[in-house]
Image (tube, grey):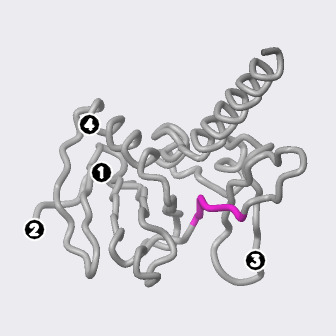
């Protein structure tokens, strides 16, 4: 009986650790938009808002600066490859950055979408090749969520969900 109780406790702790690890990859809207509106977003300011024990900074000689989520290793377990990524890329306006959040976790995107809807932001469909997209527009930024689940399942896309946060330094875009 004592062994059963210990085993049940270990399984519960393992499940809690898995939940915390998966949940740690989900970034709230506040983290993704911090310093964006003021035009002060830099790799340093974004990195400062991430838990350093879970997110590892990568600065390749070419390409975008990015952070990869790396779960704390369980004793005796093989470390898993990071599966969620946060990038800063130069926007089309070159003077500022866009935040690009890539994840295989639908729950993370669902949480973010719920936050955007609670903020009373309306979703507008976005036309994209071989994916589905929706854009939420706030007074100082847009959040576009792309879902490319089918391409991901076929091995044609590295992530099923990509979120792009773009600053609207001059206010919302003009109507077409």
Q: Residue furthest left?
A: 176
Residue corresponding to mark 2:
176
Mark 1 / mark 4, whichever is N-terminal: 4
Residue corresponding to mark 1:
171
In the shown orientation, is residue 40 left or right of residue 167? right
Q: CA distance from mark 1 to mark 2?
A: 15 Å
Magenta segment range? 81-88
Quarter placement of the N terminus: top right
Q: CA distance from mark 1 to mark 4?
A: 20 Å
Q: CA distance from mark 2 to mark 3?
A: 38 Å
Q: Position of residue 156 (x, y in %)?
A: 44, 84
Q: CA distance from mark 3 to mark 1?
A: 32 Å
Residue 87: say if magenta: yes
Q: Nearer the viewer, mark 4 or mark 2?
A: 4
Residue corresponding to mark 4:
117
Residue displayed at 36% across by 46% down: 140
Residue displayed at 41% across by 49% down: 109
Residue corresponding to mark 3:
60
Q: Position of residue 53 (x, y in %)?
A: 80, 43
């Amino acid at each position: 009986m004592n062994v059963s109780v210990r085993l049940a406790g270990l399984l519960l702790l393992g499940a809690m650790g898995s939940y915390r690890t998966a949940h740690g990859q989900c970034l709230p809207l506040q983290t993704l938009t911090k310093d964006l509106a003021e035009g002060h977003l830099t790799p340093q300011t974004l990195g400062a808002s991430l838990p350093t024990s879970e997110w590892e900074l990568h600065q390749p000689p070419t390409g975008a600066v990015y952070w990869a989520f790396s779960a704390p290793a369980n004793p005796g377990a093989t470390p898993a490859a990071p599966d969620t990524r946060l990038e800063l890329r130069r926007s089309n306006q070159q003077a500022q950055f866009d935040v690009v959040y890539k994840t295989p976790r639908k729950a993370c995107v669902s949480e973010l979408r719920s936050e955007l809807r609670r903020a009373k932001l309306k979703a507008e469909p976005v036309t994209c090749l071989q994916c589905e997209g929706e854009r939420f527009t706030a007074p100082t930024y847009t959040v576009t969520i792309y879902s490319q689940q089918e391409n991901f399942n076929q091995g044609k896309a590295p992530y099923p969900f990509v979120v792009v946060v773009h600053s609207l330094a001059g206010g919302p875009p003009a109507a077409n």
